Image (tube, rainbow, N blue to C red):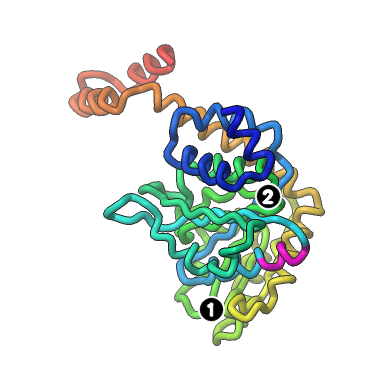
Amino acid sequence: MSELSQKILAGNLRALAQAATCIENRQPEAEDLLRELFQHTGRALILGITGPPGAGKSTLVDRLAHLIRAEGHTAGVIAVDPTSPFSGGAILGDRIRMLSHYEDAGVFIRSMATRGRLGGLAPATMDLALLLDAAGRDVIFVETVGVGQGEVEIARLADVTVVVLVPGMGDDVQTLKAGIMEIASVFVINKSDLPGADKLDDELKAMLSLAHKSNGWTPPIVRTVASEGRGIGEVMSAVRSYRQNGLAGNRKIESWGLRLREMLREKMLERIPGAEIEAAAEAVAARQRDPYSIVHDWIKRV
């Protein structure tokens, strides 16, 4: 693993792709690799892009990646696609829409399947973001499957979260009431040349006037037409403004608190066989045992 980590730090793309596969497949050696690389992380800007399906998230990421490359920076793209019902893999739709970066070694694109996980991200998304960070990528875009009432997990990972909306997709703002307003660092109204953009803008402003952000930040609303490259620079300026205000650093601490809790939960669950949990569930349902004693026994064992 030391040899592989050295190749990754040296910029070897084949080694980077090999490590990404190792991480996504949750192979045992992946954790050792990440442990070695962790000291080289913390430099990249992790930019989360979320929003409803069809909002133009992939097109927006594609345009933002072009902007980053034009500035002389490198980019990583983690595109979390829906899971294939046949293979369990990613549909790869996002990678198809980003073919303009095909020959650019400065843009590393990886599609990941959700594999049935709710929250808009795949189980290994955080680890893959750390891998790209260690590999020296300056900006890492993490695009979720599509936001819904429960898909706010991106807030645990991203330094800055961009929520992308479009006019005319029904009651857009009602969808936001389930926590999306709280996670947004920047709102983007994409396809803003369509009817209804002004109405959506007004609704967002009305809701923002009632919302209270503990950090004092009011998310700016940026209008774009990503397919034509309009408003892309303004989006990146809003992202950098959030970061320059020191708010991204505060979010890192909060995010790591959430991540550590999630990592602890996953590690504890790995120690308890699934069959044992099912057997315990049957015993509790039959009132043969109480759930509190069972959980207490598991904690003592772990």
Snapshot quadrant of residue 105: bottom right
In screen coordinates, is 225 left or right of 68? left
What's the amino acid at mark 2? Arg
Residue 259 screen position, x and y as percent: 57, 37
**Which residue: 60% across, 69% down?**
60
Badge 1 vs badge 2, beta-carbon distance below 8 Å: no
**Residue 137: which numbered mark, if any?**
2
- At numbered mark 2, what does the secondary structure look like: helix, strand or loop? loop
Identity of the residue furthest to the left in this view: 286
- The picture places residue 226, in percent across and down from the top left corner, at 61, 75
Q: Which of 146 and 250 is in front in this view?
A: 146
Q: Nearer the viewer, mark 1 or mark 2?
A: 2
Instruction: Please provide percent x and percent y for residue 265.
Output: 47, 30
User: In front: 110, or 268?
Assistant: 110
Q: Dominant secondary structure of the magenta stretch? A: helix
Q: Which of marks 1 and 2 is nearer the N terminus?
A: 2
Q: Which amino acid does label 1 sit on?
A: Pro
The residue shown at (49%, 28%) is: 29
Front position in the image: 111 or 276: 111
Q: CA–CA distance between discs 1 and 2?
A: 33 Å
Per the image, label 1 sits on a secondary structure element best described as loop
What number is the disc on residue 167?
Answer: 1
Residue 27 position (above or below residue 168): above
Which residues are drawn in magenta? Answer: 66-71
- In this view, the residue in front, 172 or 52, is 52
Q: In this view, does 277 lie above or below 12?
A: above
Asked if residue 69 is among those painted magenta in the image, a careful observer would answer: yes
Q: Position of residue 172 (x, y in %)?
A: 50, 71
Q: Do we see residue 134 in this rendering?
A: yes
Tell me if residue 200 can be seen. Answer: no
